[in-house]
Image (cartoon, rainbow, N blue to C red):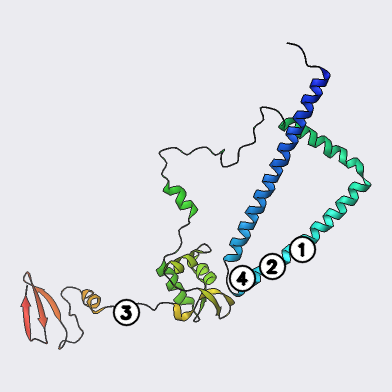
Amino acid sequence: MNAPTSREWVQAAARRLTTGSERLAAHHVRRTTLWVRTTWARTMEWLSDASGLAWAVRLTVLLAAAWVLRKVGVYVATVGARRLHTSSGLLWPVLALWLIAAWRVGHPDWQPRAAPTAERTPEPAGKPEPVSLAKEQPVGPSLDDVLAAARTLGTPHVHLAAIEEHLGAPAGTARRALTEAGIPIADVRMTGRGTSTGVRGTDIPPLPSPSPEAAVAAVGTGQDANNSNNNGVRVKEEAGMTIIHVPSERRAYKV
């Protein structure tokens, strides 16, 4: 096989550098685009997690941060342009690094690095899937626990953060429990804590009153169902029989 001439080698090297430069540029564009989308999604999620006054405060913080970043970006770009203009020798190391990276990426057998999620070791087939689902959605307090804490802390209104702090629960679990139960959430003022997202006292369901059947069922066998011996139903066991006294009917039933 004949060795390539100098002209052919230069042409092949130029094609490899060109291909590598295109791949590098596309790679950086993809990474920048992914970073922008991820940051935007997280920012919108953080903003939508609040409402009312808290939402306005968070929006103000975002606008102020954007203004500061714009000022810093303009300053850095201006200073960088001046440094490059006065110190043109810095361009040569940057160009050398770019050419080295383009030469490596421009190889015909080069493959882009797989994403971190694709490099994960697959889980064994026998491992149950509910374990991973439990990690994604942490278990929070039950609705009864949230309502009990709301009744205890309410003045009469209560903040969601105060409920979660009282129960030692992760952030957002109280909101999820109340939302699933259809209990409205709004900005409320809690004594000693100011205004924040919470539940109004009028929206907290009261404790359920015990039913008469539950009161009768709670009476032990062999005891009177009423403290009064004149108007209460009494249940007793004698000689292997259950005797029920009904004063209103003035008769007793043997079972």
Question: Which corner quadrant holds the N terminus?
Answer: top right
194 or 10, nearer to the observer: 10
Q: Residue at x 12, y 76 (%)?
A: 236
Q: Residue at x 45, y 78 (%)?
A: 203
> Are the residues at dot 4 and dot 2 in contact (C-beta closer than 8 Å)?
no
- Which amino acid lies under the numbered mark 3 shown in the image of this protein? Ser
The image quadrant of residue 67 is bottom right
Say few, some or many: other residues with alpha carbon within 10 Å of mark 3 (under 14 / 14 to 19 / 20 or more).
few
Camera-side mark, 1 or 3: 1
Query: If you read the primary sequence from the N terminus, does the residue marked by circle 1 or circle 4 appear first?
Result: 4
Query: If you read the primary sequence from the N terminus, does the residue marked by circle 2 or circle 1 appear first?
Result: 2
Mark 3–mark 2 Cα distance, whole angstroms, equals: 47 Å
Mark 1–mark 3 Cα distance, whole angstroms, equals: 57 Å
The spot of residue 221 in percent (x, y) is: 17, 73
- Which amino acid lies under the numbered mark 1 shown in the image of this protein? Val
Residue tagged 3? 209
Mark 4–mark 2 Cα distance, whole angstroms, equals: 10 Å
Mark 3–mark 4 Cα distance, whole angstroms, equals: 38 Å
The spot of residue 212 in percent (x, y) is: 24, 79
- Which amino acid lies under the numbered mark 4 shown in the image of this protein? Trp
Query: If you read the primary sequence from the N terminus, does the residue marked by circle 3 or circle 2 appear first?
Result: 2
Residue tagged 1? 68
Residue tagged 2? 61
Question: Which corner quadrant holds the C terminus?
Answer: bottom left
Quick check: 9 left or right of 113? Answer: right
- Which amino acid lies under the numbered mark 2 shown in the image of this protein? Val
Query: If you read the primary sequence from the N terminus, does the residue marked by circle 3 or circle 4 appear first?
Result: 4
Residue tagged 4? 55
Task: Check disc 1 and report its element: helix, strand or loop.
Answer: helix
The spot of residue 122 in percent (x, y) is: 49, 38
